[in-house]
Amino acid sequence: MASGQQWVLVEMVQALYEAPAYHLVLEGILILWIIRLLFSKTYKLQERSDLTEKEKEDLIEEWQPEPLVPLMSKDHPSLNYDIVTGPPSHKIIVNGKECINFASFNFLGFLDNERVKQKALTSLRRYGVGTCGPRGFYGTFDVHLELEDRLAKFMKTEEAIIYSYGFATIASAIPAYSKRGDIVFVDEAACFSIQKGLQASRSFIKYFKHNDMEDLERLLKEQEIEDQRNPRKARVTRRFIVVEGLYINTADVCPLPDLVKLKYKYKVRIFLEESMSFGVLGEHGRGVTEHFGVNIDDIDLISANMENAVASIGGFCCGRSFVIDHQRLSGQGYCFSASLPPMLAAAAIEALNIMEEDPEIFTILREKCKHVHKALQEIPGVKVVGEAYAPALHLQLERSSGSRDTDVRMLRSIVDYCLERQIALTLARYLDKEERFLPPPSIRVVVTIEQTEEDIEKAASCIREAALAILK
Amino acid sequence: MQRSTQNHRNNHVVHNASLYNKPFVEQFEETPLLVAVLTYVGYGILTIFGYLRDFLRNRGVEKCHVARERDEQKDFVPLYQDFENFYTRNLYMRIRDNWNRPICSVPGAKMDLVERASKDYNWTFEHTGKVVKDVINMGSYNYLGFAENTGMCADSATGSTHKYGVGVGSTRYEMGNLDIHEELEQLVARFLGVESSMAFGMGFATNSMNIPALAGKGCLILSDELNHASLVLGARLSGATIRVFKHNNMVSLEKLLRDAIVHGQPRTHRPWKKILILVEGIYSMEGSIVRLPEVIALKKHYKAYLYLDEAHSIGALGPRGGGVVDYFGLDPKDVDIMMGTFTKSFGAAGGYIGGKRELIDYLRSHSHSSIYATAMSPPVSQQIITSMKIIMGEDDTTLGAERLKQLSENTTYFRRKLREMGFIIYGNDDSPVVPMMLYMPAKIGAFGREMLKRNIGTVVVGFPATPIIESRARFCVSAAHTRDMLDTVSHLSETRTHTCTRHA
């Protein structure tokens, strides 16, 4: 109503007259200030540089980047890979010479097994080679589901998940569970893929001395004290221990029963990496849990690659459904990558079949490992590093010359000497600058079930000769 | 040179049209307002229901199918936060049957699906034992139709399996460098037109293992907004500073480059050691093609290095199948690092990096893959060799050229057809990846299921692979598709979707 409005207006004008002077002045200043802010130009701190356009152009002209890659010396060893002609089987042709293979991780001899090849071929004739898609988008084949089922049954766990690349398995599994703010206790001798998984997870990493349970307990106790100081944070911080069954860098076994005790005492979860021990340890080849008689449900996650004993490509994780199912949506190497080619999965299934039919092969393999371990003792100048039943041993120099390069060169001469005499060996390779705890240079000796007594004797005597000749 | 119309977002305007030798037409229509509102409302309702059901599950009223922690470990810190899995439990579970569909045949133009049924609303699946035959496959990345179990590729892979076996058992640096790998790498270098190349066993790992070898602390990585997870992971693992520019937006990229060089590293203002630009050839969720001529012009002017990930574009674009470089008619030597995968157009698995000899020599000794990861399987390598020779025409047939032409025609035809029917299609007119917008959450499930009922296998994607209101169905056109198949797919798409997916 007009009269009502007029009445309100009158009231307002009256209020203006009745207000104290300072009140009006203050409000007036505030209004002027707001108007000024509204109309002033905004600026971002970053762009407020004192450089003119010409100076910027000069800077851009002058800037010289480093070369994309640093120059490599012409005789860098990596520029000359050893070339293998033909299959990497027991008798391997390296650089044109036929040798006995002590370098490929073919523990159970499945690389040239006819049954495995036949199954792979059947699968090839049915599905072709590639899967043309990730698991989520028509890349899941019935072969994959069958392999996962078989692996779960073999390991006696609830569920298994397969990856198309061995390296990516543990490197995708760790960041799926451990996030920023969580704590991971890792053995110093952990392999490179574990280190990459830890780096991707952005968690706090605490290294404990290799196989030293007391050091680990000390770290766990320290963490417990931290927790008591901040119980709210402790309630949401997940903790994990990551260890390998058989370490690839030192060829010894982790003390699993002690780890399980620590797990329940300090409420930490265990992730076990079994690439070297799957298909090697245990009465039926189930790995280090069977070797020690530990209940497999006590281990939260077991991860292994199928590129060693199983002689295929890829990797798998197994455990309880509660744990494994999470990776189907958060494992980066699973969701964002094409699935394993079906013929490789079929080859792995057949390898599992053979492993289940004939558990004797594991005992035979372990006997051979002991044999090799014994034969390589007493070589002057080199020492054998690793457990007697480990299938991949290291030969290190007893006394280092002081420089890593010289050591590597000496060991390489031993390897070359043996290659000349038809024993195929290889140096264990590492990325010197990227490894957290760089292992000392060594020669890798791999035991396979196909090696005979004569082969082992020949290799041992050859290495002995080489050591005598080169390490005078 | 065509200009984009008023509807399009500003970042898809071609700025420097003189660098292009053919029209560059990309369209990303804005979401109509009504559709956006309805989509948010839909998600809101789903969220409320989600909270309700969580509440009922906690109280025990509703049966809980979620796997539980062991009793012995009940007092451990919970492995998952409840909230992290809210989306999975309440939204993803409802429409989970659209993904992970198992197949039991070659993933070619038509495939056989294993029939699944769920009695408990997608918590568990059972195989009924029946097979759904001859489903038109619009989901597999089979651009040139090399996913086949007969023919030259399969025969040569068979021969390779007989000769080499399936596994390798060692890394490239140790005892895993087979002669077939050397042959493959020389062929890839010839195909791309570069000096040298190196092959790796997994496409994802190619990025995540090699970017850290090329960039480190003190370097700057400029990465496109919509880059693939493998590129993001590789950039993170490298330890370099990462800055993101708007998708395919050259203005944004130039601004970042200028600022970086002028101001140097944050706080210390030291000059950057090197600048690496990460882009992809075709972006698989948008269907857009990178503006390579402009990127190369920028890179030359500002002395940055270019890393081009051609996962989807190698073999699928270009008159000779050489990828985006071939498509734009540019010189492969201008791209510093050409990376790609063998999974999509070659029907195999694995990835490669091509470039100058010094680059590849450096990667041979410093890439994580050559030292720690097992080498590529021989039959897979052989499949790549054979299919690449076919594409290059070195097998004395015209099969490769025919397939390239067929793919290009199929792409143009399919996109035109869908657009005529009024669907909103994203992406470049020449890209074989065709995203069709659905927007609403209910449509994601409905579209996937209805198409399957009519024997067409499609891929639907929602959050978190896409922004929350931009869910879409993605078709991958293949050279193996016939015109009839494409007609069937487009007609059935029309009958099964509502008017909201059409132009505003």
Image (tube, rainbow, N blue to C red):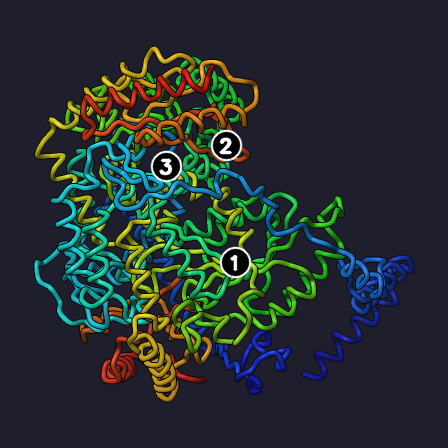
Residue occupying the point 44% across, 70% down: B322
Residue type of the residue flagged with mark 2 = Glu
Say if residue A169 shows up in the picture: no
Pointer 3 local density, CA inside 10 Å: few below 14, some 14–19, many at least 20: some
Are the residues flagged by discs 1 and 3 in contact, CB closer than 8 Å?
no
Residue picked out by circle 1: B355
Residue A439 - label: none
Q: Which chain is indicated by disc 3?
A: B
Q: Secondary structure at mark 2?
A: loop
Pointer 2 local density, CA inside 10 Å: few below 14, some 14–19, many at least 20: some
Q: Quadrant of residue B303?
A: bottom right
Q: Secondary structure at mark 3?
A: loop
Q: How far from the left and from the top, in percent, is residue B175? A: 35, 38
Residue A435 - label: 2
Q: In which quadrant of the rendered image does the N terminus of chain A lie?
A: bottom right
Classify A407 as above or below B306.
Answer: above
Residue occupying the point 21% across, 31% down: A279
Judging depth in this view, the residue of B201 and A180 nearest the camera is: B201
Judging depth in this view, the residue of B265 and B458 nearest the camera is: B265
Residue picked out by circle 3: B79
Q: How far from the left and from the top, in percent, is residue A371? A: 23, 17
Say if residue B423 shows up in the picture: yes
